Amino acid sequence: MKNRYIYPAIIRLENDSYTVRFPDLENCFTFGENLEDAIDSARDVLELCLYDMEQDGVRIPEASVLSDISLNENESIALVDVWMIPVRDKMENRSIKKTVTIPKWINDIGVEHNLNFSQLLQAAIKEKLDIK
């Protein structure tokens, strides 16, 4: 598993916005209202695609050589790099949504006292499992 990836992104101007696709990665594409937004979105989607591929055990292909990529009208290439160490850390510490069921009267009292139910559940789980 590599820690740094650099992939060519094909950026296409379409109707005053930009679409971005990665020719080496299936289903890895995005868009942006302007070029800066498109590049930022490209990095985000590349991080997610590569992280998912790592988690699923899918072989991550080598990046194409730039001279091997054919462009159509209104397209250009940008290299997008990602450093996977902080991406993995962020993804492994991300929050997930859990649905819980509690009696209405407990919910009402909690709301009345401005309890953060998410923080309370996290604290209770940590306490129960003796996680510091």
Image (cartoon, rainbow, N blue to C red):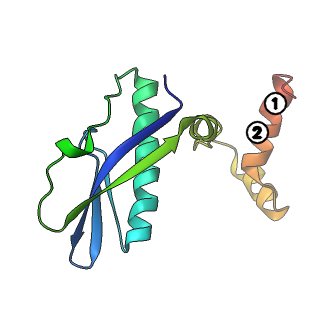
Q: Is residue 69 left or right of residue 40?
A: left
- Residue contact between numbered discs 1 and 2, judged by CB atoms under 8 Å: yes
Seen from the viewer's position, the closer of residues 105 and 15 is 15
Identified at 46% across, 26% down, the residue is 55
Q: Residue furthest front?
A: 67
Q: Position of residue 125 (x, y in %)?
A: 78, 31
Classed neighbour count for the residue bearing mark 1: other residues with Cα under 10 Å, few (<14), some (14–19), many (≥20): few
Give the side of residue 53 with respect to residue 96, left or right. left
The local crowd at label 2, few if under 14, some if 14 to 19, many if 20 or more residues have their Cα within 10 Å, is few
Q: Quadrant of the image for the C terminus?
A: top right
Quarter-of-image position of residue 111: bottom right
Amino acid marked by disc 2: Gln
* Element carrying mark 2: helix
Q: Nearer the viewer, residue 124 or 1?
A: 1
Is residue 119 visible to us here?
yes
**Tag 1: amino acid:** Lys
Please identify the quarter of the rendering in which residue 129 is found: top right
Residue 22 is tagged as none
Residue 127 lies in quadrant: top right
Residue at the spot x=31%, y=28% of the render? 61
Residue 122's disc is 2
Name the residue tied to disc 1.
Answer: 126
The answer to whether 74 is drawn above or below residue 125 in the figure is: below
Left or right placement of residue 50 versus residue 21 in this view: right
**Residue located at (65% from left, 38% from top):** 93
Say if residue 100 shows up in the picture: no
Q: Secondary structure at mark 1?
A: helix
Q: Residue at x 41, y 61 (%)?
A: 39
Q: Residue furthest bottom?
A: 16
Give how far across and how far down residue 17 sits, in percent.
29, 74
* CA distance separating discs 1 and 2: 6 Å
Q: Identify which residue, 105 or 7, lies in the foreground.
A: 7
